[in-house]
Image: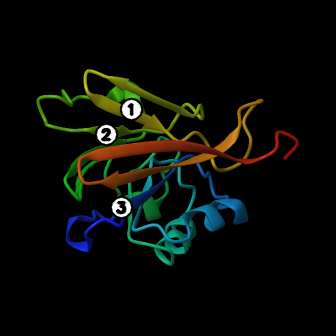
Amino acid sequence: MTADPATRVSALRIGVISDTHGLLRAEAIAFLQGCDHILHGGDIGGLEILEQLADLAPVSAVRGNNDTQAWAASLPHTRLLQLAAVRIHVIHDLGKLSIDPCAAAVQIIVSGHSHQPCVRERGGVIYLNPGSAGPRRFKLPISIAEVRIAGSVITPRLVQLCTPAR
């Protein structure tokens, strides 16, 4: 049975990346192709990273604790966005979260900093850390994420970009 085209809901695909630290891997660029929007959770490492991402889709980024150079001065420490019908709060260090997501009607909190990929739901809010897409840190995976939004359905997904040897 074919759905009535008038009732189909097109999905919004949001790419989520963090902790690139000046390295935008070819695997990350390939994964982010076709995104409607890209969120960067900080520790970007240089304006050229944001420029390369902007070639793929509109970018909303926050400043990480290592983004201390002049190019990063205009980046906010936090960002509140509405994409489709979903409110998203982006912050580099989740430990510095100063809002009550429920009171602010935020459905997704995106963070970075720890380099540890994680998706969890708490109190009706999705907490998403895509992990690090930049240089490997310790034995943590190189990873990225996406969020698909179709109507009121929010589907986050973590993806490991390359094998531990790299």
Residue type, mark 2 in image: Ile
Q: Depth check: 67 or 56 in front?
A: 56
Residue type, mark 1 in image: Tyr
- Callout count: 3
- Determine if residue 17 is in view: yes
Kindly identify the residue that appears in the image at 40 percent across and 53 percent down. Answer: 148
Kindly identify the residue that appears in the image at 61 percent across and 62 percent down. Answer: 31
Residue designated by label 3 = 11
Residue 103 horizontal side relative to residue 41, left or right:
left
Q: Is mark 2 on a helix, strand or loop?
A: strand
Q: Distance between the residues labelled 3 and 2?
A: 16 Å
Nearest-to-viewer mark from 3 and 2 = 3
Residue 45's place in the image compared with 93, above or below, is: below
| Residue found farthest to the bottom | 55
| Residue found farthest to the front | 1
Kindly identify the residue that appears in the image at 41 percent across and 58 percent down. Answer: 14
**Mark 1 vs 2, N-terminal side:** 2
Residue designated by label 1 = 127
Residue 144 horizontal side relative to residue 152, left or right:
right
What numbered label is drawn on residue 108?
Answer: 2
Q: Residues within 10 Å of mark 2 (few under 14, many from 20)?
A: many
Residue 103's place in the image compared with 82, above or below, is: above
Q: Residues within 10 Å of mark 3 (few under 14, many from 20)?
A: some
